[in-house]
Image (cartoon, coloured by chain):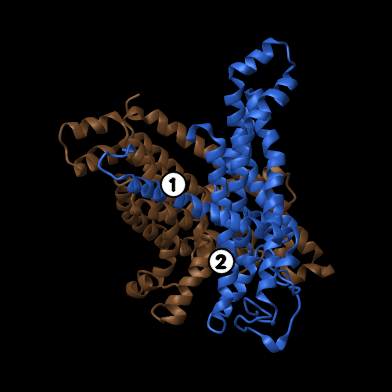
Chain colours: A brown, B blue
Amino acid sequence: MLSFTLRRLLEMIVTLLILSMLVFGMLLAAPGDPAVALLGRAAARPENQELLERLRREMGLDQPVYVQYLRWIGRVIQGDLGVSNRNGEAVITLIASRLPATFQLLVCSTIISLIIAIPLAVAAALRRGSWLDQTLVFLSVAGVAIPGFWLGLILILVFSVYLGWLPPSGYTSLFEDPVDSLRRSVMPVITLSVYLIAAFSRFLRSDLIEVLSQDYIRTAYAKGLSRRMVMWRHAMKNALPSLWTMAGIEVGTLLGGVIIIEQVFGWSGIGWLAVQAVNNRDYPLVLGIVMVVAAGFSLITLITDLGYAWLNPELRHP
Amino acid sequence: MSAPTSRTFPIQGYWRQFRRRVIPFSLSTGLIVLWAPIMGLMVIAPQALAPLPPEQMSPAERLQGPSLTHPLGTDEFGRSILSRVVYGGQTSLLIALSSVGLAMLFGVPLGTIAGYCGGWLDSLVMRLQDVLLAFPAILFAILLIATFGPSPLNLVLTIAMVYVPRFARLQRGSVLMVKSRPYVEAARACGVPPLGILMRTILPNTTSPLIIQSTLSLAIAVLIESGLSYMGLGIQPPDSTWGVMLKTSQTYLHLAPHYVLAPGVFLFLTVLSVNLLGDWLRDQLDPRSR
């Protein structure tokens, strides 16, 4: 287990390093000179040429590419992702200030979807072919295909425009005004959960159906256990590792989905920041966000793999 | 479980069969049969579905509900929403088709070489794929658009880049699987040269997963395109796609609630029917699920 953990950790670091090279390459490929961008309009004046040269030297732009990369990665490892070329704030502070908003959506929708999807999948798997099962299969196919941002717009139309129950957009911090914050997160969380519930229940249903056809389930029934006992003690226990992996993958997917959903609801999280950064041509900020989200994504994958190994006895005792 | 019990009357058995097999089958088939020609028309002959040109403005008829001349109403410049949706669909579908095509063009040879040759080449290709798969597709798209700017061509290249690793990985897996089959060994024993084995024995046997994957990718490509366009990072306003229209319609949710429906329904039905088509193809082509 320890060597497995170390190997996976090493793999993650290598992946992130290669990714950082890719991102740095993008930074070089991006049109425009960072020194010019920093000086703004003043850079065009001929008397500022000397200043521009000095700035380039200070920023290390006159160094070979690999030296520039090594300096950059050295700073990244220390948590310095540079400064936004929009307002000169540190990129890492900007990102950190938006993370709680995105976390709130991710955590709420994952928990709510699991709470709803597990009983649905269990009921469907136990009564395979029933109307409940068929409705669920149909709904999960539709739920995966429905575009999240459109669903969000429809929710705004119904709950804000027609019924006037919920505010159409905006974010309040959970620590400043918990009630308002939760009220505002209802629609984004529903939007994200519809996809997740569909994906989870579809997966768990087919997994449970396979588990239920195993010999040990028949044995469990034969020794007189109730259906509930068989389901929760034997079937769920064996479906859990793959559900865990599935949840890890889907939370990763959610990280992409939340970027769009934040635009729909004016939810000022990390995705909102990313799109603003792109529109402002704020490359340091865009690259910083990409590195942070990629690191988060890799971390989720790592936790998923380690959790799977821990849940699966075959891997725990090799 | 599936054997009918002796107590049920035959008619009940038929009803159950009907309910279990025919209804779900006909729901999805019905949707595919209904929507596939519409998608085809949107790509080949959009004027057949929407006679009015999508740029034609009539300021007097701004943001109106459905009428005979404008079956789905009009937008903020008095343009017919039906025309905008249909021509926007043409753009969306063409972008999705070309990006998935481009991704196959690069991904399939990469995967084939990696799977067939093995060794360091295989490790190199697969390590690069791992990196590209290590973060959300939409974020990768945002990174590329931020660097190279939003344009239809960049959109195609971006979505293609997202899919190259996925196709390469799939193809590598199939090639590895087929390579160890007895009939490949037989061909080798008969003295067929390596390239001949690859082209005539291995590749024809890897097409089914590719067909399924490309169909399912098409649906996600449409979703990525409309998502990026919705965020203002894809197709830019005078041109229309479903994402652009949804973005604009959000501004007019109070004044013209019908505006948000048409692009969304078209997008949803397209993604749903392409997904169902992919599932159907999987059932037909994958011998395990038969």
| Residue A271, label in figure | none
The residue singled out by tag 2 in the image is B265
Q: Chain of mark 1?
A: B
Element assignment for label 2: helix
Residue A78 or residue A213, whichever sits in front: A213
Q: Residues within 10 Å of mark 2 (few under 14, many from 20)?
A: some
Residue A250 or residue A213, whichever sits in front: A213
Question: Is B209 left or right of B77, judged from the image as shown?
Answer: left
Residue type pointed to by label 2: Val
- Which residue occupies 63% across, 83% down? B63
What is the spatial separation of the Cα atoms under label 2 and label 1, in whole angstroms?
Answer: 27 Å
Question: Is B210 left or right of A147, judged from the image as shown?
Answer: right
Does residue A210 appear anywhere in the picture?
yes
Q: Residues within 10 Å of mark 1 (few under 14, many from 20)?
A: few
Residue type pointed to by label 1: Arg
Does residue A60 appear anywhere in the picture?
no
Quarter occupied by residue B195: top right
The residue singled out by tag 1 in the image is B21
Point out residue B204 in the picture as x, y percentages from the top left corner. 67, 29
Query: Residue furthest toward the left?
Result: A224
Q: Nearer the viewer, mark 2 or mark 1?
A: 1
Point out residue A177 in the picture as x, y percentages from the top left corner. 35, 74
Element assignment for label 1: helix
Q: Is residue B183 above or below residue B60?
A: above
Query: Residue furthest toward the front?
Result: B10
Point out residue B250 in the picture as x, y percentages from the top left corner. 56, 75
